[in-house]
Amino acid sequence: MREILGRRRRLRFRRSERAAQLGAALTCATEWKWPVLPGVGLKAAGGRGDRGRGCACPDPECAVPGAHPFDPGLLAASTDERLVRWWWTNRPAAPVLLATGGTAPCAVSLPAVAGARALVVLDEMGIRLGPVVATPTRWSLLVAPYSMERLGDLLYSKDWVPSSLRFHGEGGYLVLPPSETGTGQVRWERAPLPGSARPWLPDVEAVVDALVAASTSAPDGGSRLAY
């Protein structure tokens, strides 16, 4: 009896979790007009003790398990409600991927430990940030869309930029909450404000300038952030 009740609880949890995936995808696509698509996801658990953390793609050495496009490809990303519903009705546990760039948000990401420290320092500096996505390995600061040409000019103008920064721009993608990937649960460290017609996003230059300043502002001339 106890085992049956346990299975029922797990089933209810999985259903609510899958409903959350669809809800998040619809919010992005229909309310915020962010193009999304389902990620490849994780393999199903194979048996007792098997947590099924491997990527569902054919690559056994996948570097980003579960958290990348596969079928459909990235170019299929859409804001169409019917298509989004069809995708997540057929694959309810699929991660939610944002196709970055164009009119959609871009992002600047850094290692998780440095990301947590960066937010504290940027708050102390009075920098206004937008939504922040956190995974167990990396944190991503969403920024307003930018072109690759503008990013190139921005980075070229800097004497130094932390080498661990990654830029998710046009032609890229970012996994969004409440997805689960091979590295763990994806969550909002700073969620968009409830009821936002479209979340406010800072300019990429302001964020990069702040991160560079924060990483070189220790009293002894060293870095305040562990990049």
Image (tube, rainbow, N blue to C red):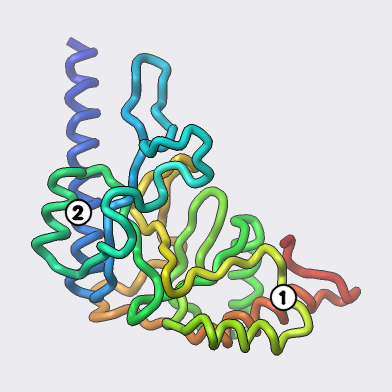
| Above-or-below relation of 135 to 151 | above
Q: Nearer the viewer, residue 147 or 160?
A: 147
In the picture of the structure, the residue carrying the numbered disc 1 is 161
Please state, as top left, top right, bottom left or bottom right, where the C terminus lies in the image: bottom right
Counting from the top left corner in percent of width and height, residue 159 is at: 78, 84
> What is the count of numbered marks?
2
Q: Residue at x 62, y 88 (%)?
A: 153
Q: Nearer the viewer, residue 124 or 97?
A: 97
Secondary structure, mark 2, is helix
| Above-or-below relation of 85 to 219 | above
In the picture of the structure, the residue carrying the numbered disc 2 is 22
Q: Earlier in the sequence, mark 1 or mark 2?
A: 2
User: Is residue 34 toward the left or the right of residue 112 in the image?
Assistant: left
Mark 1 or mark 2: which is in front? 1
Task: Mark 2: give few (<14), some (14-19) or many (20+) Cα within 10 Å.
Answer: many
**Image disc number at residue 169:** none
Q: Hey, which residue is sitting farthest top in the picture?
A: 1
| Quadrant in the picture for residue 163 | bottom right
Q: Residue at x 34, y 42 (%)?
A: 41
| Above-or-below relation of 198 to 17 | below
Q: Amino acid at mark 2?
A: Leu
Counting from the top left corner in percent of width and height, residue 122 is at: 62, 77
Secondary structure, mark 1, is loop
Q: Residue at x 44, y 33 (%)?
A: 54
Q: Amino acid at mark 1?
A: Val
Task: Mark 1: give few (<14), some (14-19) or many (20+) Cα within 10 Å.
Answer: some
